Image: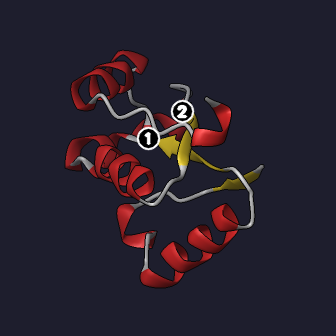
């Protein structure tokens, strides 16, 4: 398994797509871990990122939600917002055929 850390759909470049395609064709499972922030949530970047990654075969593995401590309060997003966004888009990733 290869763990990526894409944070924005703008990072899914042609070069990134090619790299992911090569990894998958070599038999690797590629997953992504991202940080869910207020700014990304408001702009819809997180939902767009999950769709873009799903299109190239990257499975969403882990979404880190920042805790609401004083030093990172500006990034805090309620967990309910993440759950709502995932339910609305209903994109949880494709499971490779080899796992069926």
Which quadrant of the structure image shows residue 10?
A: bottom left
Q: Residue at x 22, y 25 (%)?
A: 88
Tell me where residue 39 appears, x and y as whole percent. Answer: 31, 48
Tell me where residue 17 appears, x and y as whole percent. Answer: 49, 73
**Disc 1 to disc 2, C-alpha distance:** 7 Å
Q: Is residue 57 left or right of residue 82?
A: right
Vertical relation: 8 (above or below) 82: below
Neighbourhood count class around disc 1 (C-alpha, 10 Å): few under 14, some 14–19, many 20 upward: some
Q: Mark 2 points at which residue?
A: 66
Q: Name the residue under label 1.
A: 75
Residue reaching furthest bottom?
Answer: 15
Vertical relation: 49 (above or below) 75: below
Tell me where residue 7 appears, x and y as whole percent. Answer: 49, 57
Which quadrant of the structure image shows residue 66?
A: top right
Q: Is residue 56 left or right of residue 85?
A: right
Q: Is residue 83 left or right of residue 24?
A: left
Say which element carries label 1.
Answer: helix
Q: Residue at x 34, y 27 (%)?
A: 86
Tell me whether the residue at label 1 lies in contact with that at label 2, contact meaning CB atoms closer than 8 angstroms.
Answer: yes
Colour convention? secondary structure
Tell me where residue 23 appears, x and y as whole percent. Answer: 69, 67
Residue reaching furthest top?
Answer: 80
Vertical relation: 91 (above or below) 13: above
Q: In this view, does 38 lie to the left or right of 79?
A: left
């Amino acid at each position: 398994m290869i763990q990526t850390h894409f944070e924005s759909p703008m990072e899914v470049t042609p070069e990134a797509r090619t790299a992911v395609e090569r990894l998958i064709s070599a038999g690797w499972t590629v997953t992504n871990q991202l940080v869910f922030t207020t700014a990304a949530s408001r702009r819809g970047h997180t939902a767009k990122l999950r769709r873009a990654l799903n299109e190239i075969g990257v499975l969403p593995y882990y979404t880190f939600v920042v805790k609401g401590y004083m030093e990172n309060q500006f990034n805090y997003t309620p967990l309910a917002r993440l759950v709502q966004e995932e339910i609305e888009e209903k994109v949880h990733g494709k499971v490779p055929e080899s796992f069926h």
